[in-house]
Image (spheres, coloured by chain):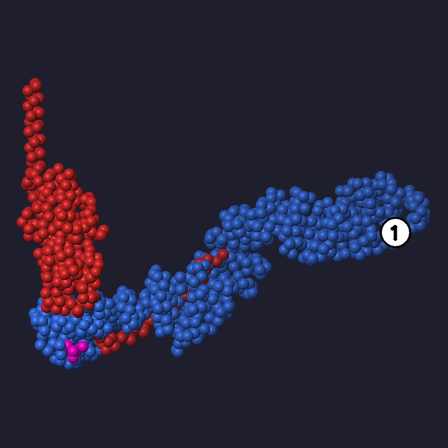
Amino acid sequence: MFRLSRVLSATVVFLGCCAVVPAHGQVEDDLREGDRYFEAGKYKKAAQRYDSAIERSPGLVSADAYGQRAAIFIIQKNYRGGLQFITERAEAQHPDAPEVLEQKALILWLLGRRAEAIDTAESVIAQKPQVYSNQGIIGEFYAGRDPARAVRAYESYFRNRPSSLEKNDVLPRVRLGFSYLAVGRHRAAEAQFDILLKKHRKQPHAEVNARNGLCAAYAALGKYDRAITLCEQIVANPRHVDRGGSVWYNLGRAYLHKKQTGRARAAGNRFIRMRQSSPKGYLLVGDAYFQERNWARALQYYLDAEKLIKGGRASVDLGIKLGATYRRLNRPGDAITVLESVFAVNPNDITLASELGSAYLASRQDKKAINTVDRLIQADDFADLDRADRAALLLIAARALYNLREIKKALRRYRAAYKLRRNDIKVRIGLVQTINLQAYEAMSKGDLNSAARHLGQAYQLDRKSTLTNRNLAVLALSRKRCNRAEKYLAALAKAPGEALMYHRLLARAYLCQRRPNRARAAKHYALAEKYALDPNLQANLLRAEIYTEWAPLLLQSNLDDAIDKLKTAAQLAARNPEVGRAARRNLALASYRRGWRNMRAGKLPAAVEDFQIATRDANLLRGTETRVFEFSLAMAHLENGESNKAIKLFNRLIAMDQPASFLKPPYDAIGLRFFAAYAKYRSGNSRLQRQAAQTFSRLQRRGRRPLGGRLRDLTASTWLYIAGEAYRTGGIDDARQALKNAARYATSSKKMKRVTSNNRIVLAMARRGMPRSALATLRGLAESVPEALVNLGILYDRLGKSRVAYDHWIRARQSGIRVRSVQQWIDTKKRMYGF
Amino acid sequence: MKRARYAVILVAIIALSAVIVTTSRSDGQRDAVEQLSVAIYTPMVQFANSTARLSYVQGLAKSLRASTGIPVRGLSFTSLSKLLRAKPDFAIVDGQCYAANMNWRLLASARIGGRTNRPWALYSRLGPSLSSLRGKKLAFVKTGCDDSDFIDNAMLESEIDDRFFGEQLGKTDLAGALALVATYKGAHAVFAPLGSHKGLPKVFDSGSVPNPAFVQLNSRLANDLVDRVRETVIGYGGSSAIDGWSAGKTQQYRALRRRMAKRVKRGLFAVPEPMRLDANEYLIEPASVGENDLPQIEQNFEKPPERQE
C-alpha cells in the first residue's frame, strides 16, 4: 500500500510555505498554527486549526490549506470523511485546484475507486506534471495495461519524488522495468533491474523481480550467455519463476540463439505448459525445429501457434515462418497460399513481400514474383526503406526477370541492388550470372567480341567467379590466346567441383600454344580423365572430348591405348555430331597407323581390322586419305590371304578413275592395275594368275621399265605358280608350257631359274623313270631348292637306293619341306628298313 | 441269300491270293527259293584243317536253315574259281578277295581275335632286316584275288620293285605259306597276320587287313530272306578260327582296295616365295594423316543456371 501521507504532508507543508494566503489576522493565525502543528506531526491540532480557519472564512483559505486538511484525513485514514470534505468544502471553494484534486485522487485510489482516481490524477498532472504522487498511481494503474503510459508516469515519478522516498522504489522500479521491456526499451529495463539489485536487493520482491526482469532484458539485448546463466539460476528454483513462465521463454530464446536447439525446445515446452494460450511457446519450439531443419515438426508447431495468434505483427511473422517452412518442405503452393493470405492484409510489409516473392520464384511463377515486389519498388517511399530491404526486393525482381529472360531489365535491377549492397554475395552472384548469360547468348551467335565485353564486366565485379573465369578461358582458347587462358584457369585450380574442367581446359591450353607443351597437356588430360570417370559427374561427353584430344598425343608411346580411348570417345559422343566427328576422324587416323604397324609385325587379321576402321567413313577423310586407306586395306587383305577382297578393292579404286597420286614413282605411272594384277598373282587361282601374267607382260611391253627386273620377276613367278597348279591337277602339258613361259622371264633371278630347273626335272620324271642328267642337276640345286632333295630321293628310290633316298628326304624335311607324302615315305622306309 | 454270301467270300479269297502272289513277285521278281547254299574260301584263316573249315560252314548252314526254314547247304572250296563255279548264294571269302570284288554285297565281317581286321607283317627266317631278303624267296597265299597287287602294293606299299625278291612262291593257304618258310625252308619270308607263327622274326608291320567277308552272291534273293540270313550270320557263334560276325562295313575293304593300287612317288614342284612389296617403296603417306581434329572448345562455355531462385 502506497504510503503517501507523510510524504504528502511534507509536500503540502512545503507548498503551503510558499503559498500566498488571503489577509485576515485570525484566519492567518489559524492557518499558521495549523501548518506548525502539521509539521510537528500533531495532526489533530492541525486539523482543528485548519477547520477553524475554514469555518471563519472558507473563501479566504487557500487551496493548499484545503489540500493540507485533506491530507490529514488520509493520514487519519478517514477516507470517506476526506472525500466528503473535498467534495463539499474544498471543491466548493477551489473546484479545479490541483492541490485539492491531488488529495482527491489519492483518496479515491485508497477507496478502490481506481478509474476515478486515475481520471482525477491525470487532470492534476496535466496541470502539474511534477505531482509525483499522482504519477505514481498512474504508473501503477497502467503498468499491466499500457506500458508506454506507465513508462511516462513512472519516469516523471522518479524525476520528482524526493530522495527520502527512495526506499519505496522497489515496486515502482519493478513495474517500470517490465514496462520498459514491454515497449522494447531493453537497455532502460536492464538499468532499472540493475538499480533494484544494487540498492534494494534485500527488500522484499526486489531481487526475484529484478532477476526475472534481467533474464528478459539480457535475452532481448542479445546478451545470450548472461541470459542463459541468469535464467537457468531462476528456473532452478521454481518459486522464483514468475507465474507467466516468461523466464522459460526468455531462456528458450537465448538457447535458440546459441543454437542449443534441444534445450530451446525443452524450455519452450515448459513455457507452453505454463501458458498454453500463448502462441509464443509454439513459435519458440517451431523455431528450434526449423533450426534443426526438421521442417515437418516445425510446421506442426507453427500451425499450433497459428491457432492462437490473433493478428498483428505476430501473424505476419508467423506467415513468414510458415511460408519458409512450406518452401523447405517443397510445398511452394502451400507457402504461397499462406503468404498471400497474410500479404493481402499487409501489402506493404517488406519482409512479407520478399518472402512471397521468393515463394513465387520457387514455384516458377516469375511474373507474380515481379508483380509482388515491383509495386513496392516503384512506390514513392521505396527510397526511404532500409538498404537491406530495398536490396532484397530488387534481388527478387532481378531473379524473376532473369528467369523471364528479360536480361536488360534484370541487369538494371541487379545493378541497383549491387549499389546498395556491394558485399551481398547473392546479389553479386546473380549479377555475374546474368552478365554471363548475356555473354553466352553472344557466343551462341558467334559474336565473340560482345561475349568478351560482357565477360570483362563480369570479371570486374568478381575476379574469383569460377563461372566467369571458365568462360573467359574458353573464349581465350577459342581465340587462340592460350597464355591468357592459363591465367583465367588459375581461378579454377582450387575451386571445389572445378577440377575436371580445370585440367581439361588447361590441357587444351597447353596444346594451343605456339609451341605446344604436349607432355604437360597429356599430364592434365590424365588428371581430367580421373575426374571424368566419376559416375556421379555424368561427364561422358567431356570424357569423349578429353580422349579425342589426348589420344593423338599417345600415338607414338602407346598406340593401342590411344585407339582404345578414341573408340570410347566415339561411343560416348555418338549423339554429339561435333565431338563425335572429331573422335571418329582421329580414330580413323590412328587405326591407319596401327594397321601398318600390324602389317609390318605380321599381325594380318588385326591389320585388316584396323584398316577397316580407318576406311569406315569416307566423309571424315581428307585429300588422298580415302584412297590411301582403302589401298592399305586391300594390301592387308592380300597379305592376310584374302586375295579376292583385295582384288575387289583394287578394282574399285581403279574404277574411281583418279590419278594414283598417292603412289611413289614409278608406281604412279603404272597405276593401280599393277596392284590389282599383283593381287591376282597372290590369289592362288590359276585363272587369275594368268590374267596377272598378262597384265605384267603388258606393262612391260608398254615400255614402262622403271620397275626394272621387278615386272619380269613377277611374270616369271606367276608362271611358276601356274605351272605348279597345272602339275598338281595333272595338266602336265599345261605345266610344261607354263614353265617355258617362266623360263623366258626368269632371266635375272637366279632363284627363279633354279626353281624352274627343278620343276622341269619333275615333269621329266613324270614322263620317264630317270631323266638324263637329272641327278646331277638336282644335286646342284639341293642347297638352294629344298624340293630338289625330295626329287633326288625319289630318283634314288627308283634306283633301288632306299637308304640314300631316305637320307635325302630327311634333309629335305630339315630344310623345311612339310609335305605329307614325303613324311609317309620316310615313315615307310623307317618301318620297312629300320632306318 | 446264302449263295450271295458264299460268292462274296470266294471273291475275297481270290483277291487275297492275288495280293499275296503279287507281293511275293514284286520284289524284283525274285525266284522262289527251295534251297540255299553258302560256301567258304578263306585260305588266310587258320582253321585246324579242311574238315574244321567244312564243319564250320555246315554249322552255319544249319543255323541258316533254322532261321529261314529253307534247306541250306554248306560248302568249302580250295580256290576262288572253284567257289565261283559252284555259284553259291552266299560265300565267306578273305578280305583280299572281297576287296578285289566289291561288287558283291557285304553282309557281315568276321571277327577274329575280337576284331574285324588283323594286323599283318612280313616275317623272315633270316632275321628282322629287309635288306637281307634281297634276292631271296617270298612265300605268299595264292588266292587268285589280285595277289601281286596285294603283295607289292598293299603289303610292300609299292616301295620295293618286283626285282627285289628273287622269287615269289604261292601256296594254297596261309598255313602252307608259313610252313614253306618256317618248316620246309623253301622260302625265306612270308606276309602273315601278327601272331600266326611264333617262331619267325618279324621284319616290319605291313598294316591291317580286313577279316573275311560274308557276301551275297545271288542277287535274285528276296531282301527279307537276305536280311534274315544276315541276322543269323551276325548272331552265329564262333569257332577256334572265327569268333563271330559283325555287321559288315565296306570302308575297310575299300581302304585295302586303295592300298592294293600302285603308288607312284611324284616329284615335288618347287614353288617360289611370293614376291612381296614394301609399302615404303610405293606408298606416299598423306601429310594430313597427322592432322588430328580437335573438338570445338566453344561448347565448354558454361551456360549460367536456367533459373535463379
* Chain A display color: blue
In front of the other: A332 or B288: B288
* Chain B display color: red
**Horizontal and vertical percent position of residue A354:** 54, 54
Residue A104 lies, with reference to residue A449, above or below; the image says above
Check the image and name the residue furthest to the front. Answer: B184
Pointer 1 residue? A10
Q: Decide if residue A590 is on the left or right side of residue A449.
A: left
**Horizontal and vertical percent position of residue B181:** 15, 61
Residue in the picture at 41% in, 72% down? A522
Q: Is residue B127 visible?
A: yes
Residue in the picture at 61% in, 51% down? A288
Q: Which residues are magenta?
A: A777-782
Q: Check residue A780 for magenta coloring.
A: yes
Locate the N terminus of chain A and report the quarter of the image it occupies. top right
Q: Is residue A701 visible?
A: no
Locate the C terminus of chain A and report the quarter of the image it occupies. bottom left
Residue in the picture at 6% in, 21% down? B4
